Amino acid sequence: MPKRAMLPEEDKELWVVEDDSLYRKTIAELLQEVEGIRCEHAYSRCEDALRALDTEPAPDVILMDVGLPGMNGIEGTKRVRELSPATRVIILTIHEDDEKVFDALCAGASGYLLKSSPPGEIARAMLEVLKGGAPINAQIARKVLTMFTHLAGPRSPSPLTQREGEILKLMVEGLTKKQIAGRLILSYHTIDTHIKNIYAKLQVHTRTGAVTKALNDHLL
């Protein structure tokens, strides 16, 4: 059960869980400067963040490292989602390991970014997730698609049209709506409508949900 309600203030609360003290300080200060975001809580261990959920209002987003001492970020993501389902977790790591990517998404992560990403990209990703998006680094998206292609069993019957299938494949590859529109020579509005239909047919509400559903059910 959730421990606390989400913060009612206009600014969105973001926590950082990262064991590298310099990187933790740097990324927290960066995000604190982004308009609409408050980042005043930064922890070196999952256990500390989980204890804080007992006493502090739950954050809107947690930026979570995978390779943490003690409880790792994947298990930490599961625990956060159990305690505060409304909190979204973005995995931040130096790793592009296929298995870690898959495990993090299955644990409930809403996105997956590399630490090598430029600071501005990380800030934009946080704003994207606060608007309901699911940022996934393009390199990682390609790795996930490749991994599932190798693991895929018989394809399930797809409820999607051929065009929706094309769009979903490009979503899995990490393309934005604007990029998909350019690739398929369609309007942004048309792509947005198709994606809404994809979400409805797959019974999901986010890009990550659609990607995970597509790969788990071998729809591509």
Image (cartoon, helix red, strand yellow):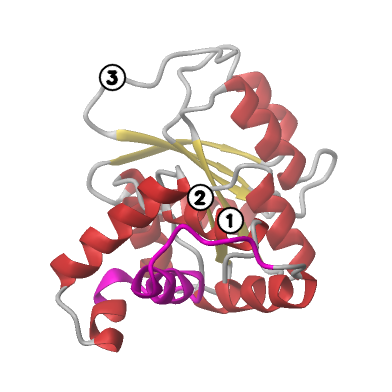
The amino acid sitting under disc 3 is Pro
Q: Nearer the viewer, mark 3 or mark 2?
A: 2
| Label 3: how many Cα within 10 Å (few below 14, some 14–19, many 20+) | few
* Residue shown at 42% from the left, 14% from the top: 5
Secondary structure under tag 2 reads: helix
Q: Which residue is mark 3?
A: 8
Q: Which residue is mark 1?
A: 212
Residue 167 visible somewhere in the drawing: yes
Instruction: List x then y, in percent, for residue 51.
Output: 67, 20
Magenta span? 155-178
Q: Which residue is mark 2?
A: 209
Whichever of labels 3 and 1 marks the residue nearer the N terminus, that label is 3
Label 2 – label 1 distance at C-alpha:
5 Å
Q: Nearer the viewer, mark 3 or mark 1?
A: 1
| Label 1: how many Cα within 10 Å (few below 14, some 14–19, many 20+) | some
Pointer 2 and pointer 1: residues touching (CB < 8 Å)? yes
